Image (cartoon, coloured by chain):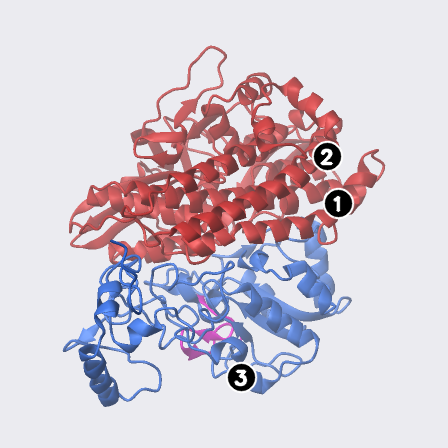
Amino acid sequence: MTRKILGPFNRVEGDLEVEVEITDDKVSKAWVNSPLYRGFEQIMQGKPPLDALIYTPRICGICSVAQSLASANALADAQGIQPELNGQLVSNLILACENVADHLTHFYLFFMPDFARDSYQEKSWYHAIEPRFRAQTGSAANTMLKARAEFMHITGILAGKWPHTLSIQPGGTTTSPSASDRVKLLAILMGFRQFLESNLFADSLENMSQLDTSDDLKIWARSHSQSDFSQFLLVAEDLELDTLGKIKSHFMSYGAYRFDDTFLFPPGIWTGEQNRAIETFNPSLILEDISHSWMLSQNETAHPFDGTTSPDSNQENGYTWCKAPRYDGHVIEVGAIARQTMSGHPLFKDLVLNGQSNVYNRIVARVIEIARLVPEMEKWCKQITLDEPFCKQASMPDEAQGQGLIEAARGSLGHWVRIEKGKILNYQIVAPTTWNFSPRDKNSIPGALEQALLNTPIDKNGKESVSIQHIVRSFDPCMVCTVH
Amino acid sequence: MSLLNAESPDVMTCLKSAQINLLWHPSLSEASTDEFVRLLDNILTGKVHLDALCLEGSVMMGPNGTGRFHILGGTGKPMMTWLGELAEKADYTLAIGSCAAFGGITAAGNNPTDACGLQFDGTTSGGLLGSKWQSLAGFPVINVAGCPTHPDWVTNTLMQLALGDLHHSDLDELNRPRAYTDHLVHHGCARNEYYEYKASAEELGDIGCMMEHKGCLGTQARADCNIRPWNGSGSCLKGGYPCINCTAPEFESPRLNFTETPKIAGIPVGLPTDMPKAWFVALASLSKAATPKRIRKNATAKHIISPPGKTKDTT
């Protein structure tokens, strides 16, 4: 039995270290450490409530809009208002643009380059993968970056810029697109659709959304082998990525792309048991445990409305700056796989009932989500009522509290704000990767990644296993949000 | 991540055109964990030459000067220590973004992590490396400040360095590239006509000038945001919200809040750059009195409701 510390991981957003215990060439225990603390929750204490809209997006350069929207929703909740429908359409377009761009960045820049490593050069598929996906030199990145940048022009029109917009407000948006903006947006979406349909899928987005079973997907991959997604599916089959990073955890979604009280992808809790229906999500069952975090008062567990953030690197049981959120006491996995399962899509019912959560399923969910979202974005553009208002004005009460629960690319993101005497008294954030990369809780139950790493083959001489890289990146972690 | 928005051409093509070999980038490189730490060791022992060290994010000095708030994963060593050592080996050191330059947003409030910039702590020269520090090529830290930075500001600075085209005189008093800080955000602002007449927006999203009421610092902020568009056609002003002067040190701590103009006796504190106060007051009252009805009407609307010139009779 030996121990090894792995880090720093790149092609993840932010700082990450993983410690593993190795027994018989396999990971027998894992500890996930977020070695950076940032202090945003402390920074916001005493600030005017609306200034949270400036501070929180700057938690992250890649989930910036998600932070904006969660903050705007928390403030709207405190004000007791619902944004204008036009504002909701524009906010959701901006969020979808960020989320789709993030999924694309993950697939092309973060995840696939690991299969172009020299260690795979004996594989039959290597000669196709290497020139296309090799980090920095692969041909796919150039094409993808061009398509991505042009797709992000949507944010230039609707959000002023990306990242770090202030266009998303509690009552809606500061931008009110014109008829001329709308045709431009539709043209940008068409250009992006063409990139997806020629490069990522070599098939129509609609066909991709209609693949209903794991077998359908495999058959599709064989007949579309020129597409980048199919390249992944063929590699995944050969490497049996569906057996890697496998956990039986509960899934959670706060519900994505909300319009008043309906969602494109609905909220819920999924327990993974064959005959149990998706359960209703209840935000009061979220508790943050800090028993293994470098935080004061390690024995206390609190709902985010009552949560505290007092960093203390001397806490004896602590091994990370990340807290351990639990839902009704359970370890939770969040992300596209959770959202797509909750949405009732038959492909994901099939994949998760048979394979639970694993590296393969996480990637498939993200890529299929792209195919499902872009046609929705086209619809939302057309649903904007140009001569109706985009933003509701309302005053901020001196005493109030509010929660903002949304789905970022990487999963469930929550903001909880308490306002007293017109200033922020407490602001707590639970980010997607805080759930996925949480440390152990007070019952010593490891977090989702800590469980997913168990039994992964690793060379006891300390030579790194590329499998660990696949597992870590399959979650598309955002560490800067995690430790906000 | 703003860097990935670079276009015409994309970031990889930009770097290639100046023959820049990216040794390592957290989002773009293959090398992870041990492979990356080996690279750092090779730089420190002189086996690999480092032309330019770029830092994104502030330097975390806390708690109590230990740097424990930011340990480089897998090394047990504080990032601030790594940065000090690597900076000594690099021809040039660049701070990418206002956090790395000045401390930025992470230094706001009570600055819980003791965050500072590489060579500035807010407006005070010093930071991690000290005010007198120079890189091997004899340059101070080059501060490509902005929150976020425009991708062009980063790629242009790196490409100019690679071509030997960046001189001391190309940096401003805060060591930011003058290529973008010789401009004010006000330059090219689509709201200029409203500014001229002090026809002011009352709510965010109104199309009038945001200087008088909505906290806009575009007439003081040093950047070319309305000349060099963001994401195709955007800017903060085009997005319907004020400039918060994010290229400047201490922008993170506004006098009042970010979207409200602090005033004394009705006159905004902080006048346009280089403008004498008496003239500003005189011109403002004059231009306000001269405001055409069209401009006054449009200033508080979300779309142009009164077009210029004679309007076509549509009845």
- Type of the residue with mark 1: Arg
- CB-based contact (under 8 Å), mark 2 and mark 1: yes
Mark with earlier residue (2, 1): 1
- Tint applied to chain B in the drawing: blue
Alpha carbons under labels 2 and 1: distance apart? 10 Å
Q: Indicate whether residue B17 is drawn in magenta.
A: no
Q: Nearer the viewer, mark 3 or mark 1?
A: 1
Subunit of mark 2?
A
Magenta residues, start to end: B115-129
Residue A296 makes an appearance in the image: no
Q: Position of residue A195 (x, y in %)?
A: 63, 43
Q: Position of residue B204 (x, y in %)?
A: 28, 59
Q: Is residue A245 above or below residue B75?
A: above
- Tint applied to chain A in the drawing: red
- CB-based contact (under 8 Å), mark 3 and mark 1: no
Subunit of mark 1?
A
Residue B294 horizontal side relative to residue A268, left or right: left
Q: Say the numbered circle drawn on residue A132.
A: 1
Q: Residue drawn at (44%, 67%), measured in percent from left and top?
A: B103
Q: Residue drawn at (39%, 55%), measured in percent from left and top?
A: A39
Residue tagged 3? B132
Residue B173 makes an appearance in the image: yes
Q: Say the numbered circle drawn on residue A247.
A: none
Q: Nearer the viewer, mark 3 or mark 2?
A: 2
Residue A133 horizontal side relative to residue A318, left or right: right
Foreground residue among A432 and A384: A384
Residue A36 horizontal side relative to residue A239, left or right: left
Q: Position of residue A240 (x, y in %)?
A: 71, 26
- SS at circle 2: helix
Residue tagged 2? A231
